[in-house]
Image (cartoon, helix red, strand yellow):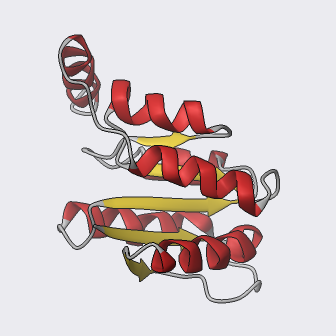
Amino acid sequence: MRIALGCDHAGFRLKEAIKAYLASKGFRVLDEGTYSEDAVDYPDLAKKVVHDIKQNRADFGILICGTGVGMSISANRVKGIRAALCLFPEMAKLAREHNNANVLVLPGRFLGVELAQWIVDAFLSSNFEGGRHSQRIEKIERMMED
C-alpha cells in the first residue's frame, strides 16, 4: 500500500514519526513535505497529497497540521477526496467504514505519537462497508458539482 504524507510546520514532528512507523510496517511512503519546522502554508501541502491520490501515485493520504482543521478544509475542496480529521482510533475506523475516507487528517498539536499510530492503524486496517453508505457518498460527490 502506498501512503502520501504531508504536513505544515506544526505537524512536522508527528509526520516524521508517522513516516518512520509506516516504513517499519512495510508501507511505501511518499513524503510530500514539509521537511522542517520552517513556516509553510498548509494548502500547498494538502494539494500535493490529494493530487497523489487523484493521480494514483498513492492509495491513501495522511495530512497533519496544528489542529487538522486547515488541512481538512483544504483537502475536501478537491472532488473525490474525503478527508477525515480523527482524534481517536474509532473515528478513523468509522471514517473508512461509513465515509470511505481516503485521507486521514491528524492534529499535530493535540496528539502524542502513540495515539497517532493507533489512529493510523485503525484507518489503514478498515474498509468501506458500502451499502447504505454508498448513496451518501454519491450525494456528497454531487454536492461538489453545485
Front one among 86 and 141: 86
Residue 87 against residue 3 in the figure, above or below: above
Residue drawn at x 62%, y 61% as measured from the top left = 64
Seen at 51% across and 38% down, the residue is 92
Q: In the image, what residue occupies the spot 60% across and 40% down?
A: 86
137 displayed left or right of 117 = left
Which residue in the rendered view is the most extreme toward the top? 132
Along the line of sight, which residue is nearer the eye, 80 or 19?
A: 19
Between 127 and 11, the one lying in front of the other is 127
Is 93 on the left or on the right of 71, as rendered?
left
Tell me which corner region of the image, top left, top right, bottom left or bottom right, holds residue 58: bottom left
Relative to residue 126, is residue 41 depicted above or below? Answer: below
Q: As drawn, is 32 to the left or to the right of 35?
A: left
What is the x, y in percent for residue 127? Answer: 29, 37
Which residue lies at the image location 38% right of the left edge and 36% below the top edge?
96
Quadrant of the image containing the N terminus: bottom left
The residue at the far front in this view is 25
Image-based side of 19 in relation to 31, left or right: right
**Count of picture labels:** 0
Image quarter hosting the C terminus: top left
Position in image of residue 43 (x %, y %): 53, 63
How far across and down, in percent of the image, does residue 38 sit?
Answer: 76, 86
Estimate the x, y position of residue 26 in percent, counting from the top left.
38, 76
